């Protein structure tokens, strides 16, 4: 028998970022006994690294902005592959969630007349992002964390969940271990909410914190949940490229929202060469017209520097490949020639200090070197739009771990409003599910024993494989073969390499004991990362077109058929099994918002 401690709750929330905190607050507010479990320390979630703002159609800068325009922007940004109902709910409820956050104490930047200020971001028709300088995620976490603590929610820090437990087909809780001591812990619960964030630590160049190993994606897949859109990974166009020690660290889109321009080696504003038909009618045709946009925001059209992220990332990639990149393999991002030093330091304080301290670059005087970095997963656990329920009874998901909302590409700022809108809904409906159950589900002791044996297996192996070596090789392979540009033969090679990494991991050995053992932690993370890498690579192989965050060099354009289906996957003992499912039919009144769209045939 395995030695473990046990805790019992109505609802447990795995992950303490924006979605997890908002879910825990809502669940607790219904009277459900709620616990919050985080892999790191409370307040250290990846949400704090979200800088630019929260997208919501408040209409404080442009009064003509409304939820219909936000919905349309979101769908077009996702190339019409989004779950339309999720996008609609998100656009309709985001303003209330921002105002709620303000009522709970969030200190937003202000307009001259005292309203919440909103900034421009790529793909948004109007200035829509409520922000706190370039530290918006930090302010969100601070506010939600204080509200959660105020409610008296139980918090379990530095605890990694390795398996979800089931009673028959339904969720019964979760198994994990304390990272400090290595001791096992079981949480019995009527409902579980996954709010574990992203997976981009699979890639060598990424913007994610160390927790982003796809834990929730793998936990849900192993529990039998449907996964959707896993092939779509967003490569943010602007990460740091130099020095190598900081390569991939995010450079907020707020730099471009506040006037920054992308330039190649020859100082050409190259984005004017990459305006896609879908956005041509709303984008400046010339540099002079774009310049007027900064001084006459009402009448001028948009700068192409603020196209959706997938478009900008591909453009930067093309410039570098053509030999027009910066000295260290990126391009230049210049705000110094557009804004004075006081403005930059006031609006972008984190970016100023980040470049000054890490790269010895003064962005008030010199251009930044930037390039694409793996940033966000559009794909994830398939959820019901209204309730966030997965296909496993008792399992709910919100935030980056949940798929469907963003389609094939996420617009900047939509992530933070997504966390608030669907975090709240997850907490509400998980609590409703739990409160309807008279008793806790049963606990299968054999499942607990199996989970413990899986966790301790690296200590018992006789092989000589090192978890750090496997992890490094996997990251390089994903970056090289399943990165921003993909091909059939390279995806096939990636699947072969993943199989070899899986075989190597069976011979992985960890020395020492379970206390303070980072090698052991990584060996367990490898299981989740290899599972998630398989799902991404299979989806990328099956989707034979280019759309959003999935670009196939051998299928360079969008395909009408693939514009009408999602790829849905389910994990089996033999690996992932995939199927195509038609997109849900959009109601006529919403479909009418896209009439006359010049890109409709290739994005619907």
Image (tube, rainbow, N blue to C red):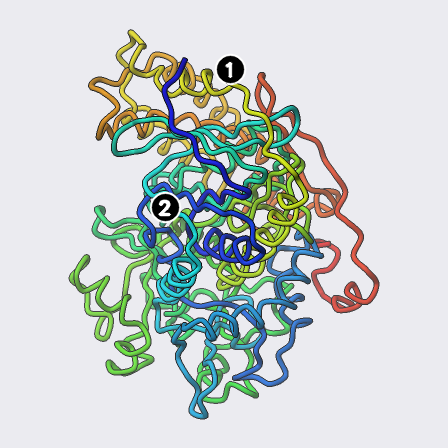
Disc 1 from disc 2: Cα separation: 38 Å
At a point 67% along the width and 66% down the height, the residue shown is 72
Relative placement, left or right, of 588 versus 426 is right
Quadrant the N terminus occupies? top left
Quadrant the C terminus occupies? bottom right
Quadrant housing residue 461: top left
Whether residue 175 is situated above or below residue 244 in the rendered picture:
above
Q: Which mark is residue 28?
A: none
At a point 64% along the width and 76% down the height, the residue shown is 66
Quadrant housing residue 439: top right
Residue 102 on image: x %, y %: 46, 74
Residue 490 on image: x %, y %: 49, 29
At a point 36% along the width and 47% down the height, the residue shown is 208
Residue 114 on image: x %, y %: 44, 89
Relative placement, left or right, of 594 versus 175 is right
Q: Confirm whether residue 311 shows in the render.
A: no
Q: Which mark is residue 446?
A: 1
Q: Which mark is residue 206?
A: 2
Residue situated in front as seen by the camera: 484 or 424: 424
Instruction: State which tag comes first along the sequence, 1 or 2.
Output: 2
Residue 329 on image: x %, y %: 30, 50
Of all residues, the one furthest to the top in this rendering is: 462
Residue situated in front as seen by the camera: 29 or 342: 29
Judged by depth in the image, the label closer to the viewer, 1 or 2, is 1
Task: Say what secondary structure mark 2 lies in.
Answer: loop
């Amino acid at each position: 028998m395995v030695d473990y401690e046990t805790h019992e709750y109505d609802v447990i929330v795995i992950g303490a970022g924006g979605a997890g905190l908002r879910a825990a607050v809502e669940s607790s507010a219904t009277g459900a006994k709620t616990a919050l479990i985080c892999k790191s320390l409370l307040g250290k979630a990846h949400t704090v690294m979200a800088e630019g703002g929260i997208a919501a159609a408040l209409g404080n800068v442009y009064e003509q902005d409304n939820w219909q325009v936000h919905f349309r922007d979101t769908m077009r940004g996702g190339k019409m592959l989004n779950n339309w109902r999720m996008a609609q709910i998100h656009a309709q409820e985001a303003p209330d969630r921002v105002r709620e956050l303000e009522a709970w104490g969030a200190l937003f930047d202000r307009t001259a007349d005292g309203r919440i200020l909103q900034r421009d971001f790529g793909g948004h028709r109007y200035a829509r992002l409520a922000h706190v300088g370039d530290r918006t995620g930090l302010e969100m976490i601070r506010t939600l964390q204080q509200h959660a603590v105020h409610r008296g929610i139980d918090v379990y820090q530095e605890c990694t969940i390795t398996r979800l437990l089931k009673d028959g087909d339904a969720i019964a809780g979760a198994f994990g271990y304390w990272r400090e001591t290595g001791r096992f812990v079981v949480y019995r619960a009527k409902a579980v909410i996954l709010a574990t964030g992203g997976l981009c630590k699979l890639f060598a160049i990424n913007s994610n914190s160390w927790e982003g190993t796809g834990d929730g994606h793998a936990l849900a897949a192993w529990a039998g949940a449907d996964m959707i859109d896993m092939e779509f990974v967003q490569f943010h166009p602007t990460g740091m490229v130099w020095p190598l020690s900081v390569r991939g660290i995010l450079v907020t889109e707020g730099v471009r929202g506040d006037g920054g321009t992308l330039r190649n080696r020859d100082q050409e504003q190259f984005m004017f060469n990459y305006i896609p038909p879908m956005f041509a009618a709303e984008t400046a045709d010339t540099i002079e017209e774009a310049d007027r946009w900064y001084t006459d925001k009402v009448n001028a059209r948009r700068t192409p520097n603020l196209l959706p992220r997938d478009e900008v990332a591909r453009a930067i990639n093309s410039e570098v490949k053509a030999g027009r990149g910066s000295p260290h393999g990126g391009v230049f991002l210049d705000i110094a020639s557009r804004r004075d030093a006081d403005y930059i330091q006031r609006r972008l304080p984190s970016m100023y200090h980040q470049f000054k301290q890490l790269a010895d670059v003064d962005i008030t005087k010199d251009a930044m070197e930037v390039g694409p970095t793996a940033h966000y997963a559009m794909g994830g656990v398939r959820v019901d739009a209204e309730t966030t329920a997965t296909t496993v009874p008792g399992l709910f998901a919100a935030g980056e771990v949940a798929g469907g909302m963003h389609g094939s590409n996420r617009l900047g700022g939509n992530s933070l409003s997504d966390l608030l809108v669907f975090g709240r809904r997850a907490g509400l409906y998980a609590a409703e599910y739990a409160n309807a159950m008279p008793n806790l589900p049963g606990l299968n002791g054999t499942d607990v024993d199996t989970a413990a044996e899986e966790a301790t297996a690296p200590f018992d192996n006789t092989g000589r494989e090192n978890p750090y070596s496997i992890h490094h090789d996997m990251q390089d392979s994903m970056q090289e073969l399943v990165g921003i540009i993909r091909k059939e033969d390279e995806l096939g090679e990636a699947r072969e390499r993943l199989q070899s990494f899986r075989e190597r991991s069976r011979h992985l050995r960890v020395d020492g004991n379970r206390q303070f053992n980072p090698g052991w932690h990584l060996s367990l993370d490898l299981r989740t990362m290899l599972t998630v890498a398989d799902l991404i690579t299979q989806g990328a192989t099956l989707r034979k077109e280019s759309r959003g965050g999935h670009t196939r060099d051998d299928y360079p354009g969008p395909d009408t058929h693939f514009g009408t289906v999602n790829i849905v996957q389910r994990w089996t003992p033999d690996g992932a099994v995939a199927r195509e499912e038609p997109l849900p039919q959009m109601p006529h009144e919403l479909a009418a918002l896209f009439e006359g769209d010049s890109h409709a045939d290739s994005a619907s």
